Image (tube, helix red, strand yellow):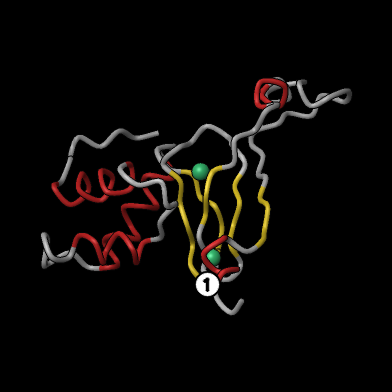
Amino acid sequence: MAVTKKHSKKRDAILREMLATTRHPGAQWVHERLKARIPDLSLGTVYRNIGLFVQEGLLRPLGVINGEERFDAHVEPHPHRVCISCGRIEDVPCPNEALLKRLHGKNAGGPGGFQIDFRKTVFYGVCPHCSDQGT
Ligand SMILES: [Zn+2]
Ligand SMILES: [Zn+2]
C-alpha cells in the first residue's frame, strides 16, 4: 500500500471529525460539519478522502443506511444496532467478543481452512427517540 507523504489540512480535518464522533457518520454529515470552517471543501473531496481512509484501514465501511453510506472510525469488529426510522447507528457491547475474535484469521473459522477476514453484525430496530414519537 502506497504511503502518501502529502498530508493536507482537509484530509486531517475530515479524519479528525470522523474520529471524534460515535455517530458512525456519512460523507454528508462530515461535509456539513466542516464547511463553515473550510468553505472551499467540496462534498467530492470528502467522499474521496473517506475512500482513501477505508483503503488505509482507518475507517470501516458500514454499508448504506437510510440511503447513505456510513463509516466507523472504531475499526475493531463490533456489533451495531441501527434505527430503521432515523438511521441512528450505535455500538452494542458484545459479551462474547473475545470468543468471536478467536474465529478470525487463517483456519480459525472451523474445519476446511476458511480464512475469516471480517464480520458484520447488525441489529435493526427502532431507537427510543423514534418509538416515543407517535405514542
Ligand atoms: Zn431513531
Ligand atoms: Zn461502531
Quick check: 132 left or right of 19? right
Q: Nearer the viewer, residue 48 or 20?
A: 20
Quick check: 29 left or right of 128? left
Q: Nearer the viewer, residue 28 or 44?
A: 28
The residue furthest bottom is 134
Ligand 1 within 8 Å of the CB at mark 1: no
Q: Nearer the viewer, residue 7 or 63?
A: 63
Residue at the (37%, 44%) spot, across then down: 53
* Depicted 106 relative to depicted 132: above or below: above
The residue furthest front is 135
Q: Nearer the viewer, residue 83 or 75?
A: 83
Percent position (x, y) of residue 65? 55, 64
> Which quarter of the rendering shows the N terminus?
top left
* Depicted 120 relative to depicted 39: above or below: above
> Which quarter of the rendering shows the C terminus?
bottom right
Ligand 1 shown in quarter: bottom right
Percent position (x, y) of residue 43? 28, 68
Percent position (x, y) of residue 74? 45, 37
Disc 1 marks a residue whose amino acid type is Gly
Query: Mark 1 Cα within 10 Å, few/some/many (few <14, many 20+)?
Result: few
What residue would you read off at disc 1? 67
Residue at the (56%, 61%) spot, across then down: 128
The secondary structure type at the circle numbered 1 is loop
The residue furthest right is 111
Q: Quadrant of residue 40?
A: bottom left
Residue at the (49%, 62%) spot, across then down: 69
Quick check: 124 left or right of 111? left
Q: Quadrant of residue 99?
A: top right
Q: Quadrant of residue 133?
A: bottom right
Residue at the (76%, 21%) spot, across then down: 108
